[in-house]
Image (spheres, rainbow, N blue to C red):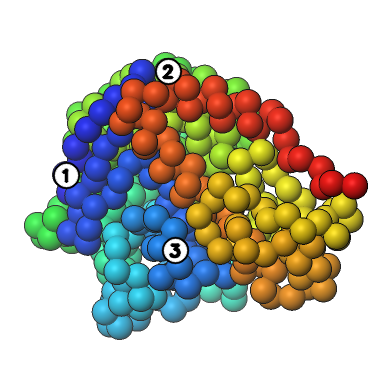
Amino acid sequence: MQFTLKAQDGKARLGVIETPRGSIRTPAFMPVGTAATVKAMYPDQVRELGADIILGNTYHLMLRPSAERVAALGGLQQFMQWDGPILTDSGGFQVMSLSKLRKITEQGVSFQSHIDGQSYMLTPERSVEIQTLLGANIRMVLDECTPFPATHEEARVSMELSMRWAERSKKAFLQFDAGQGDALFGIVQGSTYPDLREISARRLIDMGFDGYAIGGLAVGEGQKMMCDVLDVTTPFLPNDRPRYLMGVGTPDDLVESVARGVDMFDCVMPTRAGRHGTAYTRYGKVNIRNARHAADPRPLDESVDCPASQNYSRAYFHHLHRCGEYLGAMLLSWHNLAYYQTLMGDMRAAIEKGQFNDFYAQFKEDQARGDIPPLA
């Protein structure tokens, strides 16, 4: 994997990541394909919207249908008919948030499946092996997801464990990858404590990774604290490696994070919100279930180049969601992903032109304006 920094405007960065499966333009938003599918979307739709890479979930895929079965069927790209790069998470977050019973030891995490109660053991080595079997082009080290809030001592102990697991993950990656050209990212931990974030970043850099993720955020700390952590973390990360903020977030989160030097994002928010009747637009969120949309002929957002955004009335979206029709979730997910990719493309263009501050100001103005009520 090769990362090239093409332009910088303030702290905002424009780059490209070259992988064996293709190029990834940054800043990049990765749609989440939890169980080998981006919910309510066809793979070719996701690609046509401008996504260069998607995310697969190690925890869910190791349980169903199993990494070994996916490997036997040609890998995740062949399995789900996605021809571009795939990033897989390590499974650690889901183990700690979804499993019925879990126990963390130096060896790894033992847990019971949330599906059928079967017992599993996820170690740093097994996590990397699973991601290799899936065929991920970017793989993540196994880390402990520090709960929020945490005391300084709790965060330190958790971070130290994650650093030891990161070292083991790298050794496993060198064994399993065997020169195939794929990548392994380290994950910076340390909760909201600047000194721990610095220690974690420096330790990971000493180990040497292809990219560096910032973990342990978007767990309830709020946007201001998230931004504060980014402010003290990104300066320690190398300029010649991509920076990935895990599990984030809202459009405003993305813009604030790009302004602080982050290159990559993933989040279930656009598709999850779409399934529940919420649209993200240039002028903020729209709750399409609201009665005021029942007779509104306007499209969701004419500035977004997507049929779902331009061709269907808000009244139709309202009707579909009130009736519980599958098409409502499909169209709204399509629109939301289109809006997210439009937003990323607009940021890339602004950075390239040296106009990110102007973009930032206009984005904030548009969001503050809010959605325009329908005509009487």
- Alpha carbon distance from label 3 to label 1: 24 Å
Asked whether, in this view, residue 261 is left or right of residue 175, the answer is: right
- Alpha carbon distance from label 2 to label 1: 26 Å
Q: How far across and down, in percent of the image, does residue 50 sit?
A: 39, 55
Residue at 44% x, 63% y: name it. Answer: 46
Marks 2,1: beta carbons within 8 A: no
Q: Which residue is mark 1?
A: 2
Upstream in sequence: badge 2 or badge 3: 3
Label 3 amino acid? Val
Marks 3,1: beta carbons within 8 A: no
Q: Is residue 128 visible?
A: no
Residue at 65% x, 32% y: name it. Answer: 367
Q: Is residue 156 above or below residue 81?
A: above
- Say which element carries label 1: strand
Label 2 amino acid? Val
Residue at 50% x, 66% y: name it. Answer: 38
Q: Nearer the viewer, residue 110 or 46?
A: 46
Q: Nearer the viewer, residue 267 or 221?
A: 267
Marks 2,3: beta carbons within 8 A: no
Q: How far across and down, in percent of the image, does residue 13 sit?
A: 32, 29
Q: Which residue is mark 3?
A: 46
The numbered mark at residue 232 is: 2
Q: Quadrant of residue 17?
A: top left
Q: Quadrant of residue 323?
A: bottom right
Q: How far across and down, in percent of the image, does residue 276 sit?
A: 72, 60
Mark 3: give few (<14), some (14-19) or many (20+) Cα within 10 Å.
many
Upstream in sequence: badge 3 or badge 1: 1
Mark 1: give few (<14), some (14-19) or many (20+) Cα within 10 Å.
some
- Alpha carbon distance from label 2 to label 3: 34 Å
Residue at 22% x, 58% y: name it. Answer: 22
